[in-house]
């Protein structure tokens, strides 16, 4: 659990950072920091619960594995021939970052 923040800790950080803030901005920073810490604590709680759930599922399903079996496969040519666009035997796709 992340430690709560208070006015004194924020003032100490401001002093170390050599910043000067108005009382209004100080109050806003304290409020924002508390919200951030609350959020981090919620994420930590969720992560711990999720980890416990994964362990439970892993232990419950232990022994229920099966052997991998290779099935029918297709050649690279057959796989690519139905593509909308291909180049040198590879699928051509749009760049999702553009």
Image (tube, helix red, strand yellow):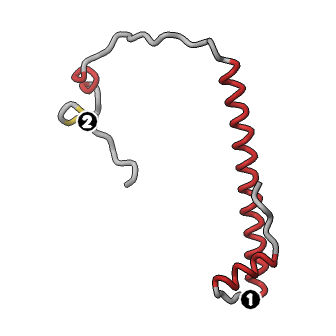
The disc placed on residue 85 is: 2
Task: Name the residue nearer the viewer: 92 or 32.
Answer: 32
Q: Earlier in the sequence, mark 2 or mark 1?
A: 1
Instruction: Report x, y in % for residue 29.
Output: 73, 75
Callout 1 crowding tier (Cα within 10 Å): few <14, some 14–19, many ≥20: few
Residue 86 as seen in the image, left or right of residue 95: left
Q: Is residue 62 above or below residue 54?
A: above
Instruction: Report x, y in % for residue 60.
Output: 70, 19
Q: Is residue 8 above or below residue 41?
A: below
At a point 73% along the width and 69% down the height, the residue shown is 32
Q: Is residue 26 above or below residue 87?
A: below
Does dot 2 land on a helix, a strand or a loop? loop
Instruction: Report x, y in % for residue 45.
Output: 75, 46
Does dot 1 land on a helix, a strand or a loop? loop
Task: Name the residue nearer the viewer: 65 or 85.
Answer: 65
Task: Quickly name the residue at label 1.
Answer: 22
């Amino acid at each position: 659990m992340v430690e709560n923040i208070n006015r004194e800790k924020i003032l100490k950080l401001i002093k170390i950072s050599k910043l000067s803030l108005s009382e209004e901005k100080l109050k806003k920073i304290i409020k924002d920091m508390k919200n951030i810490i609350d959020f981090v604590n919620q994420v930590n709680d969720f992560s711990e619960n999720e980890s416990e759930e994964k362990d439970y599922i892993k232990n419950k399903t232990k022994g229920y594995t099966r052997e991998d079996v290779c099935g029918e496969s297709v050649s690279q040519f057959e796989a690519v021939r139905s593509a909308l666009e291909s180049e040198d035997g590879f699928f051509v796709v749009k760049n999702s970052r553009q």
